[in-house]
Amino acid sequence: MSETIISFKNVSKEYILYKNNQERFKALFKKPKNAKKNKALKNVSFEISKGESIGIIGDNGAGKSTILKMITGVAFPDEGEIEVHGKVAALLELTAGFSMEMTGRENIYLKGYILGLNDAYIRQIEDNIIEFAQLGDYIDQPVRTYSSGMRLRLGFAININIEPDILVVDEALSVGDASFKKKCKAKIAEIIKSGVTVLYVSHNQAGVKELCSRALYMKKGALLYDGDVDKAYEAYEADKVKK
């Protein structure tokens, strides 16, 4: 029997929609009246076994990003239970937690601490991160001197080299030039082959079919299909025809 590494049981999540930042700030002190709400997830249940590669598909606003945020511990459910076992690497907000005044090398340690890694382990993977990021002498320059692409490359290199149990990937990310993107894709494929559990959010049908053995089809916060990738896309395309 396969070991369950991620479990969602009847998970629901609702967000309040604010008109602007001022309204959001006021809500910290006083509960808003007649606030608009968005049900991001509606009673979602699924289990993922260790070593599976899962594609999460659906239109914008389907709930895909909310699922990823909950797996990475950025968001929490209003109802239901979530269990995640193992170290999670998230290729989502790659530059979150960077200090602009610290060097790239110093930020490797800073991000490592944020991810719960100790000094000895960070030293062990430091050279691999630097080699993968391909930043040259810039690795010892303040991150504020980096282009946005360079910051993304460093963030990607850190997250991809921490030897995770679970890798969460949002393909919408743009990481460097064509050759570096190819390198990133090859690294993700290598990680999948090594037995790491992968969750892959993408609008690229060919990419999902290439990398994933199973798909979750989400629509307006609800899980409509969980199973074979081809059949998941059949359900997705059938819904598009109905529109």
Image (cartoon, rainbow, N blue to C red):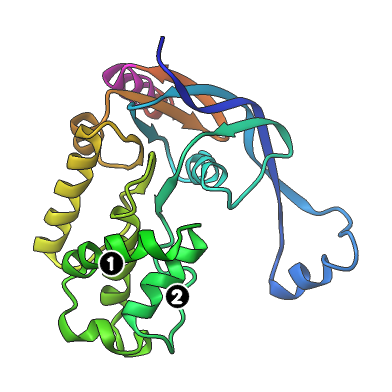
Q: Nearer the viewer, residue 130 or 12?
A: 130
The three-letter code of the residue at mark 1 reads Glu
Location of residue 106 by image quarter: bottom left
Coordinates of residue 78 in the picture (x, y in percent): 74, 39
Going 36% across and 45% down the picture, which residue do you hit?
Answer: 164
* Picture quarter with the C terminus: top left
Q: Can you say whether 169 is above or below 6 in the image?
A: below
Q: Position of residue 166 (x, y in %)?
A: 39, 39
Q: Quadrant of residue 13?
A: top right
Residue 157 appears in which quarter of the rendering? bottom left
Question: In the rendered image, which residue does mark 2 sit on?
Answer: 98
What span is in magenta? 228-238
Residue at the spot 32% in from the left edge and 16% down from the top edge? 228
User: In screen coordinates, is 107 left or right of 80?
Assistant: left
Q: Name the residue tied to disc 1.
A: 126
Is 111 situated above or below 229? below
Give yes or no for residue 138 being in the magenta stretch.
no
Quadrant the N terminus occupies:
top left
The residue drawn where x is 32% and y is 78% is 105
Q: Secondary structure at mark 2?
A: loop
Which amino acid is tagged 2?
Phe
The prevailing secondary structure element of the residues shown in magenta is helix
Mark 1: few/some/many CA within 10 Å (<14, 14-19, 20+) = some
Q: Secondary structure at mark 1?
A: helix
Q: Residue at x 55, y 35 (%)?
A: 220
Q: In the depicted view, which residue is nearer to us: 221 or 148?
A: 148
- Residue at the front extreme, as displayed: 120
Q: How many marks?
A: 2
Q: Position of residue 42 (x, y in %)?
A: 64, 30
Q: CA distance from mark 2 to mark 1?
A: 16 Å
First in sequence, mark 2 or 1: give its number.
2
